[in-house]
Image: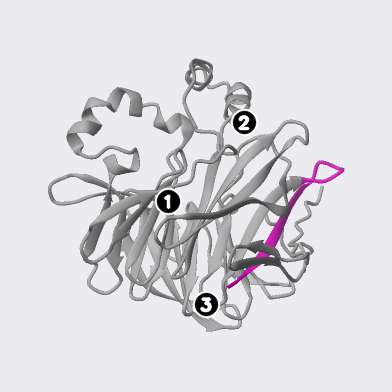
Amino acid sequence: MIKKTILIVLCVSPILLHAIECKLSRTFDIRQEEVLLRTPYSFCVTHRDEIIVVDGRAGDIKIYDSKGKFLGILGKKGPGPGEYMQPVFCDYQASRFAVIDMHKKRLLIYRDEGGGDFRISGELPCWGGGFDLRIRGREILVSGLQANREKRMYSLYQVDMDSRNVRFLVPYWDKFGQSSWISFMKKRVEIANAPIIGLFGFCDHTRDHAYFVWEGDLRIIKTDIKTGKSSSFGGKTANYRQPEVSKAMNRAYQARDKAALTRERQNLSCINGLFAHENYIGLLYGNYFPQSGGWRIYLQLYSPEGRLLEEMILPEVSITIPFKPAPTMFFDKSRQTLHYMYHRLDEEDEDRYSIAVFRIVQ
């Protein structure tokens, strides 16, 4: 049975966000006559509008042109050079493409030569794995888990591509809202349930600041990259359902009852994306709606100072699968476009992946 993947960008009337408009634009399909897209973990878009999709289950990276025509595959599943064991998250900026191989604990950097040709230009260790990454000039922001020389753990750090020097930005305890290692240790029993909610952390940057958010709490941490000084903000509106581990959820987790755990998670909001521009910060989270049998995605826009400007449901984005939506989004800073991929089942219960592309106009 052939699975169908459709990449959709729809045009509607602009939505006024105070001094910002959020519009939906062009449409095109990703065709699968030549190759099947199995499990997209992440994707990004080149300056030529080529779509690069990390297919985690297939263990490769698929490349399509701006009209959805298949161009080629980068790498294949395997332990050797040019192969991936578990490719997960990626980013693309200024003709550079970076991807994390979770199993190999490596961060691979490529130079885009055009025409679907990507040449390896660097490889960095990524011992704590990674949940998100952003290219920042000759440096890369990584959301993962990394220890400094004092063996203190950090959830966000920046690594230099050339020198491999690491700048530690967000301590692991701050990820969970604790002010110090001591306060973290005092609440370690409560925090031990965090993996039940999820461990993903999302990041992005502007010129001078890094932004980080844990999927389990709508609290954006803003860090001055030079000084390390940080603050936090977040608009927990009436729509946001604060994740908490209930007794029923804990029992389902311990019993490995996936169906029961999924039902419990559907009662909570799930943060699944963060992006940053010099003039605004964006956050995405999903809520499950039993009436429609699917997830809808909320977009929040903040001022750089952290003031919530607007919150809305993204038009046309509906995820008709029971488990929490995958964090598949890409934001192009130069063109101010947000690409969001979402997963649905069609009438024949075939997987259908769609992308809504929003242009943010100031």
Relative to 245, residue 167 above or below: below
For label 1, the residue is: 102
> Which residue corresponds to mark 3?
334
Nearer-N-terminus badge (2/3):
2
Dividing the image into 4 quarters, which one contains the C terminus?
bottom right
Assign a secondary structure to mark 2. loop
Tag 1, which secondary structure?
loop
x then y, percent, for residue 186: 22, 26
Looking at numbered disc 3 in the image, what kind of residue is underneath it? Ser
Which residue is depicted at the point 69% across and 60% down? 355
User: Could you tell me if residue 80 is visible in this image?
Assistant: no
Q: Which mark is nearer the camera, 1 or 2? A: 2
Taking the image as shown, residue 241 lies to the left or right of residue 145, namely: right
Q: Which residue is mark 2?
A: 266
Secondary structure state at the residue bearing disc 3: loop
Q: Residue at x 70, y 48 (%)?
A: 343
- N-terminal of the pair, mark 1 or mark 2, is 1
Residue at (33% x, 64% y) in the render: 209
Observer-nearest of 356 and 88: 356
In this rendering, position of residue 14 left or right of residue 112: right
Q: Earlier in the sequence, mark 3 or mark 1?
A: 1
**Label number found at residue 62:** none
